């Protein structure tokens, strides 16, 4: 099934309608056996739960977050067989459980999905606060402590987020980032994807293992991404997910 709204998405190989209001996209641009990642999109406020339940129906189990812009990283138990979702307070998750979908929801912040050899997967919510707290390298470090993974085998997908063209911040926030700049409207902006990439490469991740979406959730013309700054009172989110089947 195809839909014109999605035809311009460059990093998505296929699209399926899954339910009345949500869309369900698979990212196949980094290929790995058994890994499915992508995002569901709410078209209206208040439908995020429907996406989680759709993912649960499809894959088995879903872990979701009450996100706090923290550096708290969870390891979900993944043995919930009821119809309830597993919901944790924090901003990243790692797991080696097959069939457990890890999710982070965003509307401009940077979603980072990653996976290693063997069974390890992870999902990170990185806004500017989480980025300053170095949540991405901390999640990788925790994964290394818990699973037999090597840094040079980890693969990262930076999903669409607000980019340096549009991520305007105050001068107090801008100076906290080494890559702040003025865009062509004269606004002070930061590049959180670049900052997270630097943090991960400083940890030892090879640059070529990090795939970064160039699509800005605020201004990309090919798709109406949920954007906190663009949407105003409509509270839509992208539910970014990764699962090993
Ligand atoms: Zn932009």
Image (cartoon, helix red, strand yellow):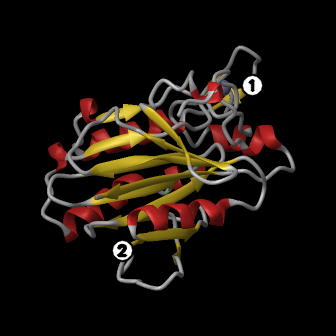
Instruction: Report the residue at 65% width, 28% height from top.
Output: 5
Q: State the residue lying farthest toward the right.
A: 233
Q: Quadrant of the C terminus?
A: bottom left
- Give the mark nearer the N terminus: 1 vs 2: 2
Q: Is residue 12 left or right of residue 36?
A: right
SS at mark 1? loop
Position of 160 with respect to 27 (left or right) is right
> Which residue is rendered at x = 22% and y = 35% of the image?
206
Q: Nearer the viewer, residue 50 or 239?
A: 50
Q: CA distance from mark 1 to mark 2?
A: 39 Å
Q: Which mark is residue 187?
A: 1
Q: How many marks?
A: 2
Ligand 1 found in image quarter = top right
Let me know if residue 134 appears in the view: no
Q: Position of residue 156 (x, y in %)?
A: 33, 42
Report the front residue among 160 and 73: 160
For this view, does 92 lie left or right of residue 24? left
Give the percent coordinates (x, y) of residue 178: 50, 34
Which one is closest to the eye, mark 1 or mark 2? Answer: 2
Instruction: Report whether 204 appears left or right of 188.
Output: left
* Residue named by callout 2: 75
């Amino acid at each position: 099934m195809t839909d014109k709204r999605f035809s311009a998405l460059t990093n998505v190989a296929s699209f399926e309608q899954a339910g009345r209001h949500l869309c369900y996209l698979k990212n196949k641009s980094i290929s790995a056996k058994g890994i499915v990642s992508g995002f569901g999109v709410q078209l209206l406020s208040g439908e995020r739960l429907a996406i989680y339940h759709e993912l649960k129906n499809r894959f088995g189990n879903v872990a979701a977050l009450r996100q706090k812009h923290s550096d708290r990283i969870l390891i979900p138990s993944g043995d919930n067989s009821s119809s309830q979702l597993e919901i944790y307070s924090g901003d990243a998750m790692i797991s080696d459980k097959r069939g457990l979908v890890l999710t982070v929801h965003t509307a401009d912040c940077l979603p980072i999905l990653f996976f290693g050899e063997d069974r390890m997967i992870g999902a990170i919510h990185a806004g500017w606060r989480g980025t300053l707290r170095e949540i991405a390298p901390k999640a990788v470090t925790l994964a290394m402590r818990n699973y037999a993974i090597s840094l040079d085998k980890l693969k990262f997908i930076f999903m669409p987020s607000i980019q340096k063209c549009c991520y305007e911040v105050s001068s107090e926030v801008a100076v906290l980032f080494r890559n702040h700049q003025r865009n062509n409207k004269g606004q002070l902006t930061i590049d959180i994807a670049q900052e997270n990439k630097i943090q991960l490469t400083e940890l030892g991740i090879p640059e070529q293992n990090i795939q970064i979406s160039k699509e800005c959730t605020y201004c990309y013309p090919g798709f109406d991404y949920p954007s906190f700054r663009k949407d105003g009172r409509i509270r839509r989110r992208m539910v970014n997910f990764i699962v090993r089947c």
